[in-house]
Image (spheres, rainbow, N blue to C red):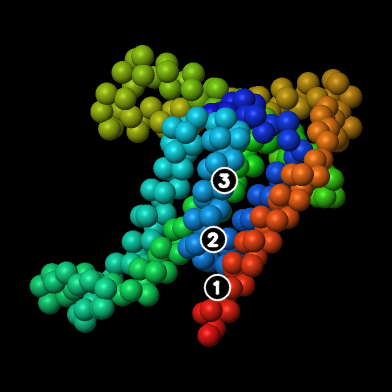
Amino acid sequence: MVIDKLCYRSKLRYTNAGEKFAFSLITLILCIISRSILIAWIVLATNGVLIVRKGGIPLFQYTKLMRIPVTFLVLSTLTIVVNISKTPLNAYAVPVGEYYITGSWNSLLWGAQLIMTALAAVSCLYFLSLNTTMTDILGVLAALHCPALMIELMLLIYRFAFVLMDIASGIMVSQHSRLGNKDMRTSMSSFGKMAAVLLVRALKKSNALYDSMESRCYDGKVNVLKENYPVKKKEVWAIILYEAVLCGIAVFIKSGRRL
């Protein structure tokens, strides 16, 4: 819900959705293909400036959102950079009895590449989601001739997610007011009861939603009003130049590795 609220407040909301979609997608693909730390830093910096300076998203909100993938990535890459072996490797080695907690420079470099590439890719997705409404994104997908069924399901699931979150929030407030989380055992019991009630409420809400759509002559297609924002040549050329620079850097790095 925070992302949705920030999206509607963004200064880049009224920029053409196709431009933002193309910029995010192409940049994300280049990050994944290149696996370059330099490109990842450039993408992170660019998206940070666009989101905070151009989009007007508060810096503390953006950093708070970025902390979620950072924590996950650091924990997941520990299995790559940390090894337990009887033979010490060249980067570091901490003796523990007959074994070493050790790692190599190659594993450290690989872990850094994975973390930076993933963070840069996440920043591309944040740029799109923090500056583009869901209806605009679905409009772009429709223009790209994505299956209509998939678009309808995305719209309904997105709408229903907020309904379920509102119901779950109300149940949790009610449980907290009755000391439903005073200890671990009570918290687990309260969570199970909340999940059971949420399932029943979700089924009832889905039936009510379908009945309301049928009463409004639903014919298998949800019609949503769309706002058309003009494409600006200056922005298009800026995107092309930026992606060309990233491609040039990626090719240079790849050729240098081969040499």
- Residues under labels 2 and 1: Cα distance? 10 Å
Judged from this view, the residue extending furthest toward the bottom is: 259
**Mark 3 vs 2, N-terminal side:** 2
State the SS at label 1: helix
C-alpha separation, residue under disc 3 versus residue under disc 1: 22 Å
Position in image of residue 120 (x %, y %): 53, 53
CA–CA distance between discs 3 and 2? 12 Å
Horizontal side, residue 211 vs residue 4: left or right: right
Amino acid at pointer 1: Ile
Q: At 59% across and 68% down in the image, what residue appears?
A: 250
Q: Position of residue 213 (x, y in %)?
A: 80, 25
Q: Earlier in the sequence, mark 3 or mark 1?
A: 3
Could you say which quadrant of the image residue 105 lies in? Answer: bottom left
Q: Secondary structure at mark 2?
A: helix
Q: Which mark is residue 143?
A: none
Amino acid at the residue labelled 3: Asn
Q: Image point 56% across, 35% down: which residue?
A: 53
Say if 137 sits above or below 243 in the image.
Answer: above
Q: Look at 49% across and 55% down and name the residue there.
A: 41
Observer able to see residue 179: yes
- List the residue tagged with mark 1: 253
Q: Which mark is residue 47?
A: 3
